[in-house]
Image (cartoon, rainbow, N blue to C red):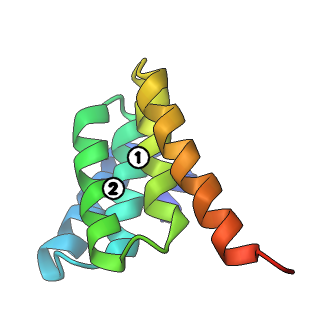
């Protein structure tokens, strides 16, 4: 995570790949891997890893979904990004209804 936050994306990708080699279903590492790949402009691979993260953690977690939407938006796919935003808004409404 520190590499990604320090904008050392190549090193972040290397570390997250090592982590996901150890545990291919570790959603947090997959999500951060997607983020680092997106920062490097590798949007297709970012989306793939964020989808793996979403499948690993279930559809109740907004983090991987947000990475999917961010990769779509950054790669020039605003319609796909808006679909993800709609899903996130539905999730928000379900989670925080009545608070």
Which residue has dot 1 on it? Answer: 68
What residue sits right under mark 2 in the picture? 50
Residue 97 vertical position relative to residue 37 in the rendered view, above or below: below
Q: Which of 23 and 92 is in front in this view?
A: 92
Graded by Cα atoms within 10 Å as few (under 14), some (14 to 19) or many (20 or more), the crowding at tag 2 reads: many
Residue 83 percent location from the top left of the image: 47, 38
Q: Do the residues labelled 1 and 2 touch (CB within 8 Å)?
A: yes
52 on left or right of 60: left
64, 22: nearer the viewer: 64
- Dot 1, how many residues are within 10 Å of its Cα: few (below 14), some (14-19), or many (20+)? many
44 shown above or below 20: above
Q: Which of marks 1 and 2 is nearer the N terminus?
A: 2
Count of residue discs: 2
Q: Indicate whether 26 appears above or below 51.
A: below
Q: What element carries label 2?
A: helix
Q: Say which mark, if any, is on residue 80.
A: none
Q: Where is residue 42 in the image (x, y as percent from the top left)?
A: 28, 33
Farthest top residue in view: 76
Outermost residue on the front side: it is: 98
Which residue occupies the foreground of this view, 5 or 58?
58
- Give the quadrant of the C terminus: bottom right
């Amino acid at each position: 995570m520190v590499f990604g936050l320090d904008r050392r994306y190549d090193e972040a990708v290397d570390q997250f790949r090592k982590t996901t080699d150890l545990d291919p279903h570790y959603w947090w590492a997959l999500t951060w891997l997607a983020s680092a790949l997106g920062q490097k402009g590798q949007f297709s691979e970012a989306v793939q890893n964020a989808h793996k993260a979403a499948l690993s953690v279930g559809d109740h977690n907004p983090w991987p979904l947000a990475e999917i939407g961010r990769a779509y938006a950054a790669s020039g796919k605003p319609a796909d990004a808006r679909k993800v935003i709609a899903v996130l808004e539905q999730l928000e409404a379900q989670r925080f209804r009545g608070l």
